[in-house]
Amino acid sequence: MRTLPSTIVVTAAAASVVLALSGCAGSAGTTSSSPAPTDSLAGSNLTVYNAQHEELTQEWADEFSAESGVTLTLRNGSDAELGNQIIAEGSASPADVFLTENSPAMSLVDNAGLLADLDSDVLDQVPDAYKPSTGTWTGIAARSTVVVYNPALISEAELPASLEDLADPAWKGRWAASPSGADFQAIVSAMLELKGADATSEWLTAMKANSVDYKGNSTVMKAVNAGEIPMGVVYHYYWYIDQAGTKENSANTELRYLKNQDPGAFVSVSGGGVLASSKNQAAAQAFVKFITSKTGQDILQTGTSFEYPVGSEVTPNPALPALDTLDAPVVDPATLNSTKVTDLMTEAGIL
């Protein structure tokens, strides 16, 4: 979860460093099939509603600004907060670009008809598995669902084979999650798409009875590490970030990837889209193209977020297992429904 929005302005670099960004022009409701004019973008201004990791987006913004001469203003917040803000603002939104951590918030804005089609040369940089069928936004990064566990409290052989197993009363009080966060709600969105509303509702009712709630994935991992609870459901990168640092909150834990196309192996796609109401379509399309280019994905790969690159055939950080080994379920990100998920979680008494 992120804090209340804050605003950061990236100062444009010298205009002489303008990069010829081919294929960066576009207009709302259209998709280009050939590179657009390479007019200079220097002097343009973009407002980015950013729910992605702030440090990562700042690195993207700094590099893009240096190359293009475009000034970017970042307004940081959470997926749901910024998605709902864009819908409330409608065509009057000052946002040019929306970046999310998970897919449901992007689909929320997309379903409201507020996104422009992305240029084809932007979409071509990302494989189909990591972008929605709508073509109105694209994946920019990915994170995998994992089980983090404390081997002193539970053996590897005792771990669940499926996320659905955690509905069994035998798991009462033995697993943790952060249900109020967008991360966990994205996982529930995948279960809804894969298993349907009735099965998801039953699982959530059992979750209410069995799980222990914490606020935030980091808190879940800390509790498992401290021996408060045997295991939790989180995203992979919390563990890898801590392991790359002091290991203060993960030294006593291990990870289990559930694989087998289980809902517990869900890979959540972070999204990037251009607002149809943006008056800076060319620069906005160019920024999303930059993020998904080799340069942009290399920034992600070598950074500290430990998320997965999804574009331009950039490999993940060597510490991570390859994406194609995770055996994640196939889910069209466009189908993930945040509103239905929050309704079901509210009905189950979880939210």
Image (cartoon, rainbow, N blue to C red):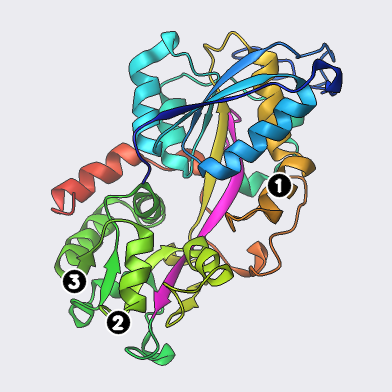
The answer to whether mark 3 and mark 2 are in CB contact below 8 A is no
- Is 343 placed above or below 136 here? below
Q: Which tag, 3 or 1, sits closer to the chain's start?
A: 3
Q: Identify the mark at residue 231; answer none if there is no mark.
A: none
Magenta stretch: includes residue 294: no
Can the viewer see residue 249 in this picture? yes
Magenta-tinted stretch:
132-149
The residue tagged 2 is 227
Q: Is residue 75 above or below residue 94?
A: below
Residue named by callout 1: 299
Q: Residue at x 21, y 61 (%)?
A: 202
Amino acid type, mark 3:
Asn
| Residue 316: % across, % down | 69, 60
Q: Residue 84 location in percent, x, y?
A: 34, 27
Dot 1 alpha-carbon crowd within 10 angstroms: few under 14, some 14 to 19, many 20 or more:
some
- First reached walking from the N terminus: tag 3 or tag 2: 3
The reply to whether residue 123 is in sight is: no
Q: CA distance from mark 3 to mark 2?
A: 18 Å
Give the secondary structure at mark 1: helix
Which is more toward the observer, 51 or 3? 3
Q: Nearer the viewer, mark 3 or mark 2?
A: 2
